[in-house]
Image (spheres, rainbow, N blue to C red):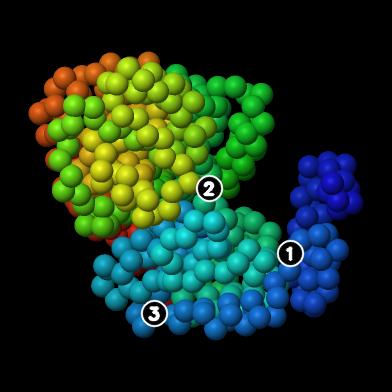
Amino acid sequence: MSVRSRVLGALPRGAKDTVKTSLVTARRMAPAALVRGAERARGRAVASASELVDARASRPLPPDASTRLWVAPANFAGQGYEWARSAERLPDVGARSMNIAGPIRFPTDYEVPPAVFRDLTWQREQRAALEAYTHVLVEAERPVLGSLYGNCAEETPALTRLGLQVAHIVHGSDARRPDVHASAHPHSPFRDGHDPRTARLQRLTDRNVAYLRECGVPVFVSTPDMVDVVPGARWCPVVVDADAWASDTPVLERARPVVVHAPSNGWLKGSDLVDPLMTELHEARVIEYRTLRGLDRAGMLREYRGADIVLDQFVLGLYGVAAAEAMAAGRVVVAYVGDASRRVVREATGEEVPIVEADPGTLVDVIGHLIAARDEARGLAAEGPCFVRRIHSGALSAVALGDFLTSSDE
């Protein structure tokens, strides 16, 4: 632990916040070279001159439109980029997306390495670049200017002072409070309050939800379960290219159906509960079970297109990008969506989600029923691509963002 962390840890909460704010302000006013020296002394990677030059050269020009939207800085599952494209469906709206480079790459308009995102020179230049925009959509309560203002509570007013309209969009785990979730879902992964992962998420989500409730700007959520968690939030559906995921592989024609499960985070998908059940069915030669980990986009496309049944998650009570991709591929999708999420989709669209409902206690029976009633299962699978085209093409996301993007201080 650094000296800075030890000192802050010893302070009362109020004093700690005051000191943090003072340190952030001092950093913002300091010479960039001095700040880089301090970063090196703390053992943190510092952006090289060439990285800063590349970031400056690759920064996209503002859109040629009356309404100019900046979406940043997460782009989880490529959704920041997709929401930017969705916004451009609206009249005279242009948009750009930005994210921090990570191990998995998704389409984006602008990507910078983590060290660049932390760099004071880049942050100052990016702040100046945002003055050419009219609106900012902040993802996952992560500041779009890195550590320049310390957190969203300080950054949002600063962006407003620049003349920008600001909104937030929740991705999910950034605001899904473990205590609330555990009280509502019998197989919640957060039921063990002593798990350090749960404790970390509790601190993060408590802070984020408290901020979202007080921020005074529009809040959107990407998954239907979050509408009830963040008061006043509006569902902005995830976006999937149905044509890219389309498959002509017949469904449930093999004697042993191929069942795949591709958890992006096994803990939050219930993989530890699902894998033993499906492995037992695999060993009994009822199904061919494949657990997919570490695949790139091409690998996921191949496996989903060739599967009969796709297992999504069984503990959270929602559906997101992965389930929508599997529906777009015309596969039978099985997940714990939950009554609340289904209700939100029904009320917003008038449609039923074509995902087979199951939880860890019912999954084996559900798989058995799908194998026994194959025609019924094929019919449900056939509904998936049409559902995705209607709900997750970006058109409804544009409608959701429309009121925000027509707001102006002018």
What is the spatial separation of the Cα atoms under label 2 and label 3, in whole angstroms? 28 Å
Q: Is residue 150 left or right of residue 99?
A: right
Q: CA distance from mark 1 to mark 3?
A: 33 Å
**In this view, 136 is above or below 285:** below
Point out which mark residue 207 bears. none
Q: Is residue 353 visible?
A: no
Quick one: SS at disc 1? loop
Residue mark closest to the camera, 2 vs 3: 3
Secondary structure, mark 3, is: loop
The kind of residue tagged 3 is Pro
> Which image quarter: residue 313?
top left
Residue plotted at (81% across, 60% down): 43
What residue would you read off at disc 2? 212
- Identify the residue position indicated by label 1 in the image: 45
Distance between the Cα atoms at labels 1 and 2? 31 Å
Which of 362 and 225 lies nearest the eye of the viewer? 362
Q: Which residue is mark 3?
A: 63
